[in-house]
Amino acid sequence: MEVEESGAELENAGKVEAEAEYHSHDFDWEDLKAKVESDPAFSYHLSPFSSPAAGTTSPPQPSSEAWKSFHRRHASGKFFKERRYLLKEFPELPNSKDCAKILEVGCGNGSTAVSILRSSESITVFACDCSKDTLEKANEIISNTKGIDIKDRFHPFLMDVSKETFPDWLFCNAYPSHHKVRKEQPDFLRENQCCVSGMDFVTMIFTLSAIPFTIMPSTIEQCVSVLKPRGLLLFRDYGLYDMTMLRFLPHQRVGFREYMRTDGTLSYFFTLDTVRELFHAAGLIEVALKFFNMFSGISITYVVYTPFLIQVHKLLTADLHLPTALQLELEYCCVQSVNRKNGKKMQRVWVHGKFQKPAS
Ligand SMILES: C[S@@+](CC[C@H](N)C(=O)[O-])C[C@H]1O[C@@H](n2cnc3c(N)ncnc32)[C@H](O)[C@@H]1O
């Protein structure tokens, strides 16, 4: 077993993600779960986590500091891998209405931002990260992207989402939030324009897993505060029993399903239930892709009021035994690939989800 998911592994994960474009259900997650949970070699991943006694270890550095060092060490920008597949996974982005505004949280070198900006000339991307170095790299990569002028539609800003609040120029009082806001006036705002009026979309792509689990609820709440009513939060991150989780050693556990790489960066591995609970607690509702009643032939595509549909689905299947299917936009993406160098099978698991802010 290798020690950890190294920088090279992260890079490779990006490639596998890119190749995962048209196949995301290569194996069944329940089969993988059964295999992992019956293998004694993996038992330490399953046991409840007990924190070391107070005073026996030195306090860990904040996770954002580790990410800043990570980006300083990898200043070449080699972690840039355009995530084109995201537009297939989230077709709302290329199909969004005119002048859609998107906030990319934890944008890194701009892998996600570039693909979104390319997809439509009327999209504007606001992007934050805790690392100044990576924001500069993202700006450079995006300014040099050939074929389409995306420079004026990309607005990066420095922010640690685990402890700061979003700037007040990002969202308007029309969408009230109890968060304290800062007073700043960025250059791209027109004279007398107080803010950019909130976001139509927030994307969290492999960012939440990098933040301590205990801080996730307040971080999500923050992100929800900048979303317009009916706006969508698009989520993709590591799933439970992803290959990279199973490589962590017992001493690298820092919480239940939470691990620290040797460079101090964190990685959390999500179940669908954890994701659902976190986003529901912040007031978001799940987006359902399709509801189908085989008995009546009724099919509803892209419905939003999911809690009601879940109730209907339960009633029809469990109580009335009617054949209905409810496909939610919260699922495991399971991709199998083979390492060309050593021929080893790699089983990657990601969680893909869409959540909506209610209208009121
Ligand atoms: C795995 S990268 C994902 C980058 C990007 N979203 C993408 O699609 O490639 C995680 C990013 O989150 C950023 N990050 C980690 N903790 C953060 C925090 N507390 N505030 C803001 N950004 C953070 C890191 O600097 C890093 O760029």
Image (spheres, rainbow, N blue to C red):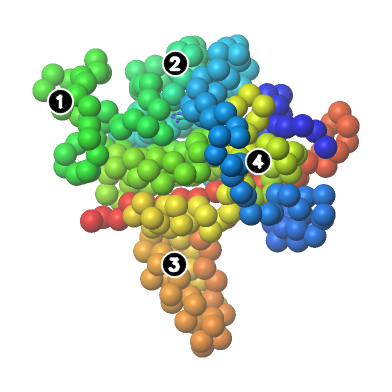
Out of 259 and 220, give the one closest to the viewer: 259
Where does the image place residue 344, in percent across and percent down from the top left? 86, 38
The quadrant of the rendering that contains the N terminus is top right
Residue of label 3: 300
Mark 3: which amino acid?
Answer: Ile
Residue at the image point whose x is 38% and y is 47% from the top = 232
Residue of label 2: 132
Dot label at residue 193: 1
Q: Earlier in the sequence, mark 1 or mark 2?
A: 2
Dot label at residue 253: 4
Does residue 14 sit above or below 282 in this rendering? above
The quadrant of the rendering that contains the C terminus is bottom left
Which of pointers 4 and 1 indicates the residue nearer the eye? 4
Q: Earlier in the sequence, mark 3 or mark 1?
A: 1
Mark 1: which amino acid?
Answer: Gln
Where does the image place residue 233, in percent across and percent down from the top left? 41, 45
